Image (cartoon, rainbow, N blue to C red):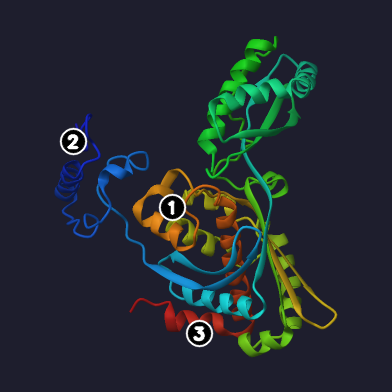
Amino acid sequence: MADRIPRDKTDDYSEEMARQRREFVSAKTSTPLDHIGHYSVDPATTAGNVENFIGVAQVPMGLVGPLLVNGEHASGDFYMPMATSEGTLIASYNRGARLLRESGGAKVTVVDDAMQRAPVFIFEDARQARDFGVWVEENFDQIAAQAETTTSSGKLRNIQQFAAARMRYLRFNYTTGDAAGQNMVGKATFVACEWIVANYPGIERYMLSGAMDTDKKHSFLNTLHTRGKRVIAEVTIPNELLQKSMNISAEALYKARSISQVGSFMAGSHNTGAHSANGITAAFIATGQDVANVAESSAAVVYADLDAEGNYYLSITIPSLIIATFGGGTGLATQQECLKMIGCDGAGKVHKLAEIIGATVLAGEVSLMSAVLAGDWVTSHDALGRNR
């Protein structure tokens, strides 16, 4: 029988237990853990974030800025911490940030906010499922009241319905305050579903998730209806500035966008932009977000236009930005420092963080698009992206 990883049922989040586990795996694998075991965090603070704690994964962190944001919650210059191991990334985002700043800043708007749990109810036939849907609409207020007994910050906004076979899929949409809210809405929806089963006859069974909430999976349903924060970042860049700073014209960028839209369509991509996942992932690691949510958060719709003077309008819509400024990894020491750096620690800051990330992503988009056309993409990676 294989040896079990050391654990302590009474105090598993201690330096002593972390040391025992490092020594255990080091002996098993003949691998010294000098770097993994070198950290400044208190192991006790990781309870609720990780199990079998042994140390930390150190990811290099760089600084992007000043990033000028014209938001409703974030206004002014910000210096954005980004954690990445990809060379050229920080340099590229800084180049984009400078261009946005010289163009007057990125205008960023949070246009929607919703987190889902999507149970499915199964009936004897489709007619019973249809009638159940009518009852759900008529009893929404009572369902919402039951769901909200489990949370002080979550609010059930609406319930979308989808019919298939003898099933009725209900997509519960909540606002969740400063939390990302996946666990919050799961608990709330469970209580609501149990009340529904107790008060509506004929339900054969139900599942708390029928997979239409698409946790940590992209879906076009989220692109249309939002999961997390729906953020739109936009800027108009003078043609002369593009030519001076990026060695490319607004017209060339606009034509290239038309070509890449066709390529994205043919590939079946959920993102018509260049690389929003880069900026979102680096920001997520730095600020303590659930990095697996990049699977949904990286979806993006990029749109470009030329105005009457030949200036370049660019926008990116991020329909599923799943972030928090409370709970999860946001309370860890390093991540707290990063959130404080951009003024996003504490209550009521989640939309501010969404706007700053939206502006960051826009900076990366315009920089990479320009680099590809100007021929800087390969040469920049050759100069900065090789660990020699």
**What amino acid type should be assigned to the residue bearing mark 2?**
Asp
Using the rendered image of the protein, determine whether residue 312 is visible from the camera's viewpoint: yes
User: How far across and how far down the image is residue 276, in percent?
Assistant: 58, 63
93 or 273: nearer the eye?
93
Picture disc at residue 3: 2
| Residue at image mark 1 | 288
Q: In this view, does 191 lie above or below 157?
A: above
- Which badge, 1 or 2, is on the more N-terminal residue? 2
Q: How crowded is mark 1: few (under 14 residues within 10 Å), some or many (20 or more)?
A: many
Picture disc at residue 79: none
Q: Is mark 1 on a helix, strand or loop?
A: loop
User: How far across and how far down the image is residue 305, in percent?
Assistant: 78, 72
**What amino acid type should be assigned to the residue bearing mark 1?**
Gly
- Considering every residue shown, the one lying at the far right of the view is 308
| Residue at image mark 3 | 379
181 or 122: nearer the eye?
181
